[in-house]
Image (spheres, coloured by chain):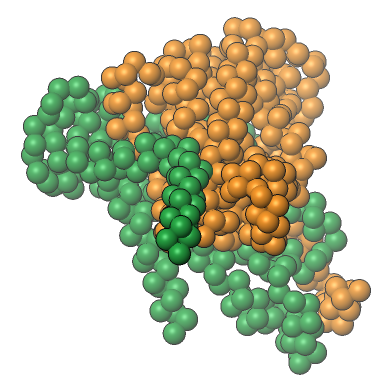
Chain colours: A orange, B green
């Protein structure tokens, strides 16, 4: 209702409106094109890509590019590595964040605000800050080239944002619930596990989405800490593959699609949720 | 009385233990991976150190060398990230703001537009970088082929391999990829402006642009501040696209602090200097965050 009145009364400028739509559509195309380009060239042969059919749909759908990427490019393994690292990092940081948020927001004690501010430092600290010492310590402990080499730092780097988002959700839960639980004889820990945690389900997906993107796409730590091919994650694997197949574009395109489609599928079904988690993560920070 | 007191004490201790246990996993992760390493970096930045021996204490020599020794290229790296920050703040953010304001007028399909514009943010920078490599490829890349097709052959370049165009080739995708991110944040603010307020202003004869300029933008200023901070600190932290597109080349002309940091570890075995770059990065990120916050506050007064 309200929108229409605004549009009709003052927006009586059809030319302006048309220009606006042309601009919006143009920008949409600019943003869709790279993804379209990726999907189409992943199914083409070099002859097609380098020949006349650069940006059209593939004439011969060359699924063998995907088998090349999966077999000789090891993308299947890298996919599973990424999946394992991401899921465990999300799990660890989620549990740690929920517990810390509970201690900060729902238990009254003197330094709760200070502790929260301490965790929030992590939002500004660049990931590069810790790379040298962490690398030296890990290599002295012979801890490079393992899954945990990435899982632990990823959990740590996802933590601050997870606490920030969890706090937003946890303060919304009425405090009367805690008091009621206390009267019923629940201890602090019991209140957390039996009352608060079940009510934090909406936070799980918001936090999870944010952490997923952070871990799934992370490149710098993975590139520095993982040198053996058995533990590579997708971003590092793609870099390696593009080094081997400099002249063949199809398999690289296939690898890019393999690395991107889970995110795109998530986005297709959860676009609003994903956008909300980004807003929750920034507006309060 | 006394019994009551000890009782209270035991509950207090119990409470303390509970708080500690609940904070433990988070603090352990946070301190071991973020806080302690910063302290170590700070300490090691005063050493000439190869990472494995004891190293020699050299005071602030690393910092001095960082700024004076041209072969380290730190000034180039700093200049590059400042340039990236400049384009982020003065090209990327105004563009994001424009999109947010337009979508805030609730055109048809605004949800669809928003979702499409936000898509590049979700895709790994490595993937984005690979796609742009295919666009920049000198022989078969889309950009050169497009230029040839429209008769602008003399504009074609070896984009990422030419000193003149390499930095620009890194800046364009970086700026492009995160337009959607800032747009989303600003749009969330724009949508929060009440329709009554807009309508009232328009009944008073304000045009749509005037409403945006005098009502919407002042309201979303805190969000713009956050965006500016993210854009600048993000530029200082840039790494992925440089690694993928140019590897810091040609002739180290596109190095950024993070790629130098990595070179110090793997090419030069200079862990002390690497720590120094880390410390500089943290210091710059915090300094800019404070500076930008202060600048916005000043403007308000």
In the rendered image, residue B84, in percent from the top left (x then y), is placed at 43, 51
In the rendered image, residue B205, in percent from the top left (x then y), is placed at 76, 90
Residue found at the very far bottom of the displayed protein? B204
In the rendered image, residue A203, in percent from the top left (x then y), is placed at 68, 47
Q: Residue at x 54, y 22 (%)?
A: A233
Say how many tags the image has.
Answer: 0
Residue found at the very far right of the displayed protein? A1
Q: Answer whether residue B210 is visible to the viewer in this image.
A: yes
Q: Does residue A125 appear left or right of residue B134 in this picture? A: left
Q: Does residue A24 appear left or right of residue B134 in this picture? A: right
Comparing A203 with B145, the one in front is A203
In the displayed structure, would residue B216 be above or below residue A71? below
In the displayed structure, would residue B148 be above or below residue A64? below
Q: Answer whether residue B181 is visible to the viewer in this image.
A: no
Comparing A13 with B26, the one in front is B26
Image quadrant occupied by the N terminus of chain B: bottom left
Q: Residue at x 18, y 25 (%)?
A: B50
Q: Which quadrant holds residue A173?
A: bottom right
Image quadrant occupied by the C terminus of chain B: bottom left
Q: Does residue A146 appear left or right of residue B104 in this picture? A: left
Q: Residue at x 22, y 31 (%)?
A: B271
In the rendered image, residue B152, in percent from the top left (x then y), is placed at 57, 42
In the displayed structure, would residue A134 be above or below residue B167? above
Comparing B127 with A107, the one in front is A107
Q: Residue at x 43, y 55 (%)?
A: B6
């Amino acid at each position: 209702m309200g929108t229409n009145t605004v549009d009709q009364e003052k927006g009586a400028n059809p030319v302006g409106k048309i220009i606006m739509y042309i601009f919006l559509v143009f920008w949409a195309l600019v943003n869709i094109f790279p993804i379209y380009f990726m999907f189409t060239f992943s199914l083409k042969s070099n002859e097609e890509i380098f020949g006349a059919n650069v940006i059209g749909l593939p004439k011969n759908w060359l699924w063998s590019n995907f088998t090349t990427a999966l077999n000789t490019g090891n993308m299947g393994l890298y996919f599973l590595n990424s999946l394992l690292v991401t899921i465990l990092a999300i799990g660890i940081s989620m549990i740690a964040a929920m517990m810390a948020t509970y201690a900060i927001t729902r238990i009254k004690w003197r330094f709760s605000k200070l502790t929260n501010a301490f965790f929030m430092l992590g939002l500004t600290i660049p990931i590069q800050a810790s790379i040298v010492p962490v690398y030296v310590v890990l290599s002295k402990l012979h801890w490079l080239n393992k899954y945990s080499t990435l899982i632990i730092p990823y959990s740590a780097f996802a933590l601050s944002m997870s606490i920030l988002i969890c706090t937003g959700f946890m303060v919304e839960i009425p405090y009367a619930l805690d008091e009621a639980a206390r009267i019923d004889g629940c201890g602090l820990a019991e209140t957390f596990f039996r009352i608060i945690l079940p009510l934090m389900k909406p936070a799980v997906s918001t936090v999870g989405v944010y952490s997923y993107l952070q871990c799934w796409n992370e490149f710098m730590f993975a590139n520095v800490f993982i040198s053996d091919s058995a533990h590579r994650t997708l971003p590092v694997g793609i870099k390696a593959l593009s080094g081997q197949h400099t002249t063949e574009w199809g398999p690289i395109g296939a690898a890019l699609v393999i690395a991107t489609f889970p995110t795109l599928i998530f986005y297709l079904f959860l676009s609003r949720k994903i956008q909300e988690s980004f807003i929750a993560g920034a507006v309060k920070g | 009385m006394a019994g009551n007191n000890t009782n209270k004490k035991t509950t207090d201790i119990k409470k303390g233990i509970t708080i500690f246990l609940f904070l433990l996993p988070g603090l352990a992760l946070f301190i071991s991976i973020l806080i302690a390493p910063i302290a170590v970096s700070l300490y090691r930045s005063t050493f000439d150190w190869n990472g494995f021996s004891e190293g020699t204490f050299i005071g602030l020599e690393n910092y001095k060398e960082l700024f004076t020794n041209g072969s380290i290229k730190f000034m180039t790296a700093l200049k590059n990230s400042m340039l990236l920050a400049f384009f982020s703040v003065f090209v990327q953010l105004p563009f994001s703001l424009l999109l947010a304001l337009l979508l805030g007028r609730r055109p048809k399909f605004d949800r669809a537009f928003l979702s499409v514009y936000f898509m590049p943010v979700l895709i790994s920078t490595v993937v984005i970088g690979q796609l742009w490599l295919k666009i920049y490829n000198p022989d078969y890349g889309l950009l050169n082929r497009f230029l040839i097709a429209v008769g602008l052959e003399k504009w074609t370049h070896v984009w990422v391999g030419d000193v003149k165009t390499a930095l620009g080739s890194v800046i364009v995708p970086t700026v492009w990829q995160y337009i959607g991110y800032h747009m989303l944040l600003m749009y969330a603010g724009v949508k929060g402006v009440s329709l009554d307020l807009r309508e009232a202003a328009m009944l008073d004869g304000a045009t749509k642009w005037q409403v945006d300029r005098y009502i919407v933008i002042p309201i979303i200023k805190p969000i713009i501040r956050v965006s500016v901070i993210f854009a600048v600190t993000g530029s200082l932290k840039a790494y992925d696209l440089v690694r993928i597109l140019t590897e810091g080349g040609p002739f180290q002309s596109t190095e950024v602090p993070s790629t130098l940091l990595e070179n110090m570890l793997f090419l030069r075995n200079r862990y002390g200097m690497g720590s120094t770059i880390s410390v500089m990065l943290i210091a710059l990120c915090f300094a800019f965050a404070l500076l930008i916050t202060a600048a916005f506050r000043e403007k308000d007064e």
